Amino acid sequence: MLLGAVASLLLVATCAPVATIRAQRSDTSVRVAVGFGVDTVGVPNQEIFALWRSYLSSGPSCMHQSPLWSPSEQAQWPVADLLCGYVYQGFSKCTVVHLAPAVGLDSTYLIRTLVAHVSGPGQDVQPLSLYLVYATRDVGRWVLANALPRLTRRWTHETIGRITFVFPPTERFARARAEATAAFVDSLAQAFGVPPPPTIGYYFTDDLIQTLGAAGLEFFPLGSDTVGGRNYALDRLVFIGSSSNGEGYRHELAHVILWPFLAPLNAAGLVQEGLMTWTAGSAGLGFKELMPGLNHYLDTHPDLTLQSILTNPPPRLGSLDVGYDGLAVLCKMVYDAGGLAGIRSLAGAGREPRAVISTAAHVLNVSEAQVDRLWRDRIANLSR
């Protein structure tokens, strides 16, 4: 099912968390032990195990390429290790528990790794992630490679415009919806004066856990809501989980499209998400469809302010995300008053909540004290 028939490596590692690492400053290196029944002596197990141990011990980073990774994947994706943001969070003391040949792929090994926190007198295991990586041959040596192209090699690939939609063969494909999504790419890029991405990989299934599993992330604590998406803007990849709008989930696409616009601006996280929600919706709903729920929430929380949302946003409740939706309205207000230059000023205000509110007030030509009232009034109008 993953890289290679001739070889496949399956690793499961149990790792101590960053808090433990910081407490033990005398030894911050990753230690990789070998679990029961794991063959690290045979050929090519010994070489592949050494490769994986070296990679884990190097402190993998999303910001730096590794000579241990596949050169072809590094050329394809600026952030070549697609799961780095999930699995490398400072955990240490890894245990390799299994090595096994991959099925259906030549000269390839599968690597499965469990990352977990072990704590308490009972040595309770709290898993962070279970994920897959491959080892494959490249110019006479073993290198690491992603699960994504291998696990989806038999999925359906449909290219429309700049987007290649990739989905399981059992998934029904809504072509008209996909065509509208493809047209959205050029439309949004043109509106913001940025070059459209030349290509975008758009992976979708009925739920996000299944989609991320295709990237090799077999377990990660996503919570109970499996409708949503993730994006890798630099790699021009999006991963969507939605049983009702798989081809039309545009929020993550907007992140990819508007990356050149936002990259130099150091925008606050919720300003970025608000911009995506205004331009592309959220939770599978359009911007306007999100307004009634937001308006109802504000009616029942009269003391909630934009500054408090930016400082400590309320938790998401189903399709309602007060942070995303509330900042989307602020983005619309700023655009209506100041156009693209106003949005650029808001995104360039930095990450301090007070600075964001002050910039919005300046563009709207009102006092900071008036922003919340105008914001609530706009939401009420949009929800009608």
Image (tube, helix red, strand yellow):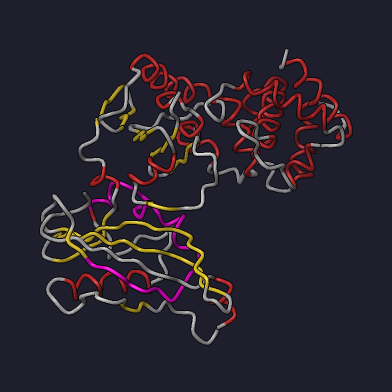
Magenta part of the chain: 72-99
Where residue 96 appears, as percent x and y from the top left, is 32, 72
Q: Taking 365 as reference, is 88 above or below it?
A: below
Can residue 233 be seen? no
Q: Taking 122 as reference, is 155 above or below it?
A: above
Is 74 magenta? The answer is yes
| Furthest-bottom residue in this view | 26
Q: Taking 6 as reference, is 335 above or below it?
A: above
Left-right relation of 370 to 21: right
Can residue 234 be seen? yes
Residue found at x 85% / y 35%: 368
Is 251 magenta? The answer is no
Q: Nearer the viewer, residue 20 or 180?
A: 20
Left-right relation of 356 to 135: right
Where residue 298 appears, as percent x and y from the top left, is 79, 29
Which quadrant holds residue 319?
Answer: top right
Residue found at x 56% / y 76%: 20
Where residue 225 appears, as percent x and y from the top left, is 54, 39
Residue found at x 82% / y 37%: 304
Q: Nearer the viewer, residue 63 or 137?
A: 137
Left-right relation of 274 to 355: left
Which quadrant holds residue 354?
Answer: top right
| Furthest-front residue in this view | 122
Q: Nearer the viewer, residue 95 or 148?
A: 95
